[in-house]
Image (cartoon, helix red, strand yellow):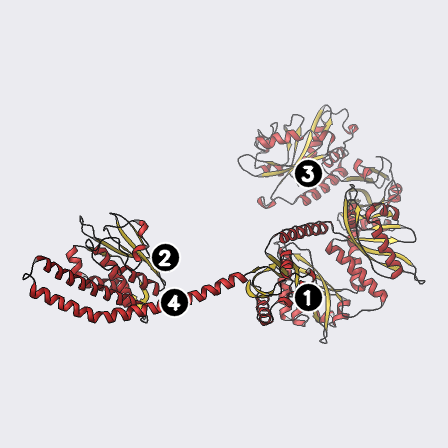
Amino acid sequence: MFIPRQSVEGSPDRIPRAIDTAMRHLGAHAPVLVLDGSLRVRSVSPHAARVFGRDPAALIDRHPEAAGLVCAVAWAAFRARLGELADGPACLELELERPRDAGALRWRVSGWLEDGGERFLLCTVAQTDAATVPEERPAAEAQRLTSAATISAIGALDERSHLLDFALRASRDGLMYWDIREDKVWWSDRYAEILGMRPGEVRCRAEWLALLHPDERDGIIEERLECARAGRHFLQEYRMRHVDGHYVWVSVRGQTELDAEGDPVRQVALITDVSERRGLLEELRLANELAQLHLVNTPLIYIKHDDAFVIEEWSPRTEQVLGWRADEAVGRTVGQLGMLAPSRLQYVKARYARALADGEPVVSAIGPCYTKDGRLLSIEWHCRVLPDERGGFAKLLAFGLDRSEQVAAERALKRSEERLNLAMRATNDGIFDWNLETGRFWGSPRYAAILGFPAEEIELSIGEIRQRVHPEDATIVNDALLRHFTGGQPFTAEYRVRTRDGTYIWHYARGESVFDADGKAKRVVGVVTDVTQRKIWEHELAESERRFRDIADSTPVIIWLLSTRGECVYANRAFREFTGRPVGDELGLGWMACVAPQDRERITSTLHDAFEMREEFTAEWRHRHYSGEFRWVRSCGVPRFGDNGEFSGYIGTTEDIDAQRQAWSALETANQELMRSNAELEQFAYVASHDLQEPLRMVASFTQLLAKKYRGRMDAEADEYIHFAVDGAKRMQKLIQDLLTFSRVGRGELHFTTVDTNALVGEVVQTLKTAVAEAGAVVTCADLPTVRADESQLAMVFQNLIGNSLKYRAPDRPPQITISAAPGEDGIEFTVEDNGIGFEPRYADRIFVIFQRLHTRETYPGTGIGLSIVKKVIERLGGRIRAEGRPGEGARFVFVLPV
């Protein structure tokens, strides 16, 4: 807004007086301060002083920064933005921080005002948080009071018009002053700008009245007079004619002054252009009316409910379809009405919550719905979930269509179009309408976007559309149209189309024709889907399948694929070469013809169980070879699942194991024969050793009698011979006893009990206490666990191992024997370790072989059976044993017993 220069000509000091006037009329209601050309404070309203918390006198002739009104950074930003007032907006709005974290204030700064060689800025300030200053009024109220004060000031003095223009430079309002008695009208520049006029074009009441809309003119004048008589300001919205002929909506607020007799004297008003707001309100009103009209007339069911499924809106169509009146439904839940079964209601609630969490705007589904009279309908629902301010489920708009019955063809087509439009919004497909009579082709915004055009409706000729079809696909489109027009088949085609940037994408188009009374097609209406990505996936899938088949055909292993119904859908070259049949004979259930009849029922049951459980399977059966013989095969199958987790069948391999089965059968026969031979050998050893004991005892007894009676009576050579005979008999007795012990290990029945190995080892050491004492040995036993075993057999193991450590002790140090246990992979791992003479690691297996010795009998006497007995006992208990050692470093025996 511009303050006319002539209002202050010849009076250099008028600007300060105008400022004083502004402070008297504006400062009482709003925080205002004036800066001069050097940006020093020229004047401060009392209200502004309270906002800043400063003495007004302390602010005059000081920069706001120096006076402590803004911080240094904010003041620098303020000065930097003043340049925008030259050619930019009529005012600036910015937030400026105060010093020492005192918060920020919102500054509104007018454009530069010049007169008499001086420049001024009019500034209003307000708290960014009105609650921090209780006496601070909201900005809108301050503006209203400011406007009212300005209007009063103009009525008082001519010079105040200068001040009004000065103040209104900070706003976008226009000002009108009407001297009713003189019939003179004055407008501000902004007032004229709103109506597209030049200042001064309207000079009297008649000219102003001519601009008012005829339907509103009388009411405007009457309302202003009523407000004046009641002592109120008037606030009106009405239309005024723009210079180009259209009407502009304006909001006018002002005051009419009356004389003592109650006649109007003058009128002052502020005007604001509200055309845009009124336009938006009108559009909203029309949209609401259209929506209500649509809900009344549409065949769609419409229900609105809250997050607890309490119904808030119930359309007439819903009443017709479901039977409940609106007053019966509103305020009750869908569950209380019985529209949905409880399980279905829980599913729907979970589905809406998931859609809200995933950002899914529309949930579409066809589901069961009960009517008031108990009928079950199939309703196609399209539901919009509306979130609350926290992102939770707030409201739901549900649109449904009764799919239970089909009505007349016209209504069916109309419902189909409505469903199509709704579906297009949900699926993002494009819609097209081809007028066969005019040749014009219309596409929806989504159709335009698919072709690379701006997302708005487009209209092209059918020739332009045909030119965009890929030359190689033109025949596909023409043939599809020919079948549609002549054969009545729906129009469907997949083809490539050129987009705006010249690239080709794939379209999947489908449509139907509208025919006239003569059966001639008038229009083709349909939808298109961009299936480029699907085509890429199909190509990649085909390429992947080709690579798979190439790899599968190049391997010697039989590879096959089964469908979800157990039918063979692929058999590789190795399969065909094995059976010698064409691939077609193997597909479906044809491969079962080659399964041996006696195996078919078993294989069918195995496959059925695997398909039911979706588990891997392995099966063996006899399959007819191309030579005509049945050969044993082994098949391993693994279930296949798609990216979405859906079961898609089995993939597997088959191998010829006929030779393996024959070898296994021969091995089984050999093992059985070996077991029989071993049993006979053990029986023979037991019987032989048992029967040998009696004659051996006789030989030993008489030999000992000879030694006792004749030792010393014959020569030394005879005594030596008798000694050899006695010693041999004793060793023979020991050998036979050990053989009997060895044979008994495998013959007796095991009695498994819970064995405390700590107590068991203690008993064994007590049994060997004489040998332990003679050797000067120290036996250390860690805390041993409880195990399941045959106690007597396990005692034999520890007795032999401890005895072995005592026997093979080092001559230069006392024996140290350590017994411990720890959990292992297969059970409890026991260790018996000593510091004896040890052995070469290469003999670790040999020492467990019966009769095998690492030392001479003269050095270390014995039969060589003890460790063989230990190994046999451990194996009967289900465990295993190993030996570790090095010469001179001792031996370590480790055996594992299962848990």
CA separation in Å, label 1 and label 4: 83 Å
Q: SS for tag 2? A: loop
Residue identified by numbered label 2 = 824
Residue of label 4: 675
Closer to the camera in the image, 266 or 639:
639
**In this view, the mark in front (2 or 4):** 4
Q: Earlier in the sequence, mark 1 or mark 4?
A: 1
Nearest to viewer (mark 2 / mark 1) = 2
The residue tagged with tag 3: helix, strand or loop? loop
Dot in front, 1 or 3: 1
Nearer to me, 187 or 411? 411
- Which three-letter amino acid code belongs to the residue tagged 2? Gly
Q: Please say whether residue 450 is visible from this viewpoint.
A: yes
Q: Can residue 254 be seen in this snapshot?
A: no
**Up-down relation of residue 845 to residue 618 (above or below):** above
Q: Quadrant of the N terminus?
A: top right
Q: Amino acid at mark 3?
A: Leu
Q: Which label belongs to residue 26?
A: 3
First of labels 2, 4 by sequence position: 4
Q: Are marks 2 and 3 in contact (CB under 8 Å)?
A: no
x%, y% of residue 865? 27, 61
Residue ID for mark 1: 311
Q: Secondary structure at mark 4?
A: helix
Which quadrant holds the C terminus? bottom left
